[in-house]
Image (cartoon, rainbow, N blue to C red):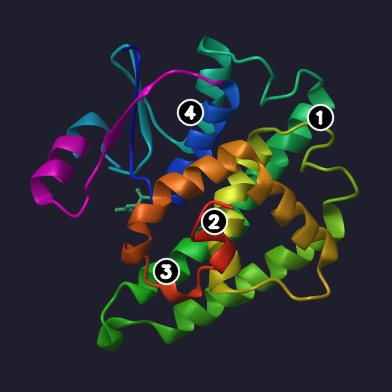
Amino acid sequence: MALILHAHPLSSCCWKVLIALYEQGTPFEQRMVNLGDADARRGFEALWPTAKIPLLEDDGAVVPETSIIVEHLEIHHPGPKPLLPIDEPVRLRARLWDRLFDLYVMTPMQRFIAELLRSEGERHVRTQQEALAALASAYDLIEARLGADPWAAGADFTIADCAAAPALFYAAIVQPFPPSHATLSGYFDRLMDRPSVRRVIAEARPWFSYFPLVGDIPQRFLADS
Ligand SMILES: N[C@@H](CCC(=O)N[C@@H](CS)C(=O)NCC(=O)O)C(=O)O
């Protein structure tokens, strides 16, 4: 098999690439990475030194970083519909939203959860407060700038939406959207209804008990509707 994705079903970053693969119907082998196991981590570090998931291997070539992985797939294993739009201004918009969701939603959401995973004595309340404030301003940005199109970059589902779905799924659990943010909520509901997104959620479900805020996961994600 040419494509191997090193991933974990609960990881938001892995969802981003899995959603892209499922959107395109690209065949691949998924290999579970357990970064909590010292031997597994060392072996994984030998592949790529940051030891972050996901990591793609394409016929032996190692491809790190989710946005680059999606772009690599688009170049070397294109599917039926481009996740990087052909039209350059639209492509730039897709890349911008991909960065916005990664840097301003995914990153503070992960920072908040990383603190939750520490023991109470080691937890930095200030870091958590800053992460929540960062999420609140990201929600405001999305609400103000997303526009009326169904997807982040326009009429079509793109790399930006692959990034948005996992980031917003976990962020909404950490900090629910304000009721005033109807555009953000409507976009979120469209994302959560997308078959590729439903599939990553279903695949993560057996692992939800390891998520520290499992009790806050909305009921609608706990079983197939
Ligand atoms: N910028 C990286 C972020 C990757 C990342 O942070 N992955 C997380 C999982 S969502 C990870 O590997 N966490 C484990 C660790 O940091 O040890 C990307 O987009 O690929």
Check if residue 28 falls in the magenta segment.
yes
Q: Position of residue 118 (x, y in %)?
A: 29, 75
- Residue 69 badge: 4
- Magenta residue span: 25-44
How far apart marks 4 and 3 lie (CA) works out to 24 Å
- Residue 113 badge: 3
Mark 2 lies on residue: 106
Whichever of labels 4 and 3 marks the residue nearer the N terminus, that label is 4
Q: Secondary structure at mark 2?
A: helix
- Residue pictured at 75% horizontal, 28% vertical: 91
Q: Position of residue 184 (x, y in %)?
A: 77, 60
Whichever of labels 1 and 4 marks the residue nearer the N terminus, that label is 4
Horizontal side of 6 relative to 143 (left or right) equals left
- Residue pictured at 74% horizontal, 23% vertical: 85
Is residue 65 depicted above or below 198 in this figure? above
Ligand 1 has an atom within 8 Å of the beta carbon of the residue at disc 4? yes
User: Which quadrant of the structure image shows residue 219?
Assistant: bottom right
Q: Secondary structure at mark 3?
A: helix
Mark 1 lies on residue: 90
